Image (spheres, coloured by chain):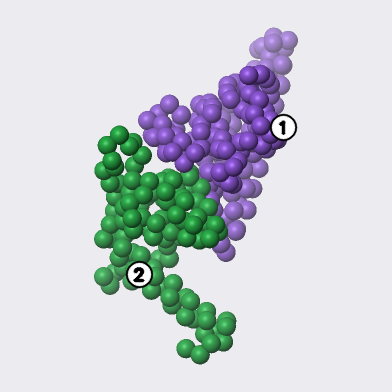
Amino acid sequence: MKVTTVRKLYWNFEKEERWLNEMAAKGQALLHYSWGTYRFEQSRPSEWIYRIELLPDVASKPASQEYLAFMSDTGAQAVATFQRWVYFRKLSVDGPFEVFSDLDSRIAHYKRVLTLFMSLFAALLPITIVNITNISRGHLALAFALPLLAILIGVEALLGTQSLRVTGKVRELEVRKRLFE
Amino acid sequence: MPAENKQGPLTETVYYVLLALHTPLHGYGVMQLVDEMSGGRVNLGAGTLYGALTTLVERGWIVPVAGAAGDRKKEYVITDLGRDVVAVELERLEELRRNGQRIAKGEPR
C-alpha cells in the first residue's frame, strides 16, 4: 500500500475538509494527521467522505471516547484525532455524510470553534504587547525580537481573521434560524 | 396534563427520534428508520442525533435499555412521559394542518 505524506497548515477547517475530500476524490484517503502532517493511503476514487469536527473535550477524554464509539457505530470512523479535532470518514456508498443536520447543532459547533480561536488570540495578546513595548524601549536585541514579533503578529492576525469569519457563519445561521429549524 | 399543553413546538429531530423510539433502537437504527419514515427527506447527522439522545435521556423522555449480552451498542426506548409529549405535539401538528388546509387550500372545515 502506497502512503503519501503532505505537510500543510490550515487555519480554516472547512477549507481543510474540502481539500481532504478533493484528495479523496483523487483516490488519496487520509489515514493520519498530526502537527500539519497528513498521511494518505491509496483508495478507490471518492471511496470516502471526510468531515472535521471540533470536540468539546480532547479526544482522549472518556466523554469524547464515548462519542467516537457512537459515531463509529453509525459508520463514521475517526481516522485521526488531534487534540480536540477529529477527522471522520464514512464510505460514500452509504449515502451523504454530515455530522450535523440541524441549525442548532451547526451553530453550537461554530461557537465551539469561535471560542477556541478567541481564547488562543487572548492568550497571545499579552505576549505580543510585552514584545512591542520591550522593542520600543530598546530592551531587546532586535535581531531576535523582530522575527518573533512578526510571527506573533502574523498568528494574531490569522486568529483574528478566522474569528471574524466564524462569527459571520454564526450570524448567518442565526438569521436563517428565525425562519427555519 | 394541562401544563403539558403549553409545551413549545418540538424540533423535527426530537419529534422523529421520539417516534422512532416507540420500538427500542440504537443510534444507527434511529437514523435508518427516520430516513425511511421521511422518504429520505430527513438524514439525521450522527453528531446531532447524539446530542438529541443525551438531552432526551436527561429529560426522561427516553431511557437506555439493557441490550443483548455482548452488544455494546446502547439501545433506547421512549418513556410514558415521552409518549405524553408526542401526544401533545401531535395535537399541535393537527391544528397546524387543519388551519393550513382551511386557509391556504381553501377547504371547508
Q: Amino acid at mark 2?
A: Val
Which image quarter is the N terminus of chain B in?
bottom left
- Separation of marks 1 and 2 at Cα, in angstroms: 51 Å
- Asked whether residue A130 is in view, the answer is no
Q: Position of residue A22 (x, y in %)?
A: 70, 35
Q: Are marks 1 and 2 in contact (CB under 8 Å)?
A: no
Rendered green, the chain in question is B
Check the residue under mark 2 and report the chain it is in: B
Rendered purple, the chain in question is A
Say left or right for A147 vs A84: right
* Residue at point 51%, 31% (across, down): A78
Q: Position of residue A61 (x, y in %)?
A: 40, 28
Q: Residues within 10 Å of mark 2 (few under 14, many from 20)?
A: some
The answer to whether B80 is drawn above or below residue A104 in the figure is below
Relative depth, front residue between A72 and A132:
A72
* Residue at point 63%, 36% (across, down): A47
What residue sits right under mark 1 in the picture?
A26
Q: Residues within 10 Å of mark 1 (few under 14, many from 20)?
A: some
- Asked whether residue B40 is in view, the answer is yes
Q: Amino acid at mark 1?
A: Lys
Q: Position of residue A85 (x, y in %)?
A: 53, 31
* Residue at point 41%, 31% (across, down): A65
Quadrant in the rendering for residue B95:
bottom left
What residue sits right under mark 2 in the picture?
B88
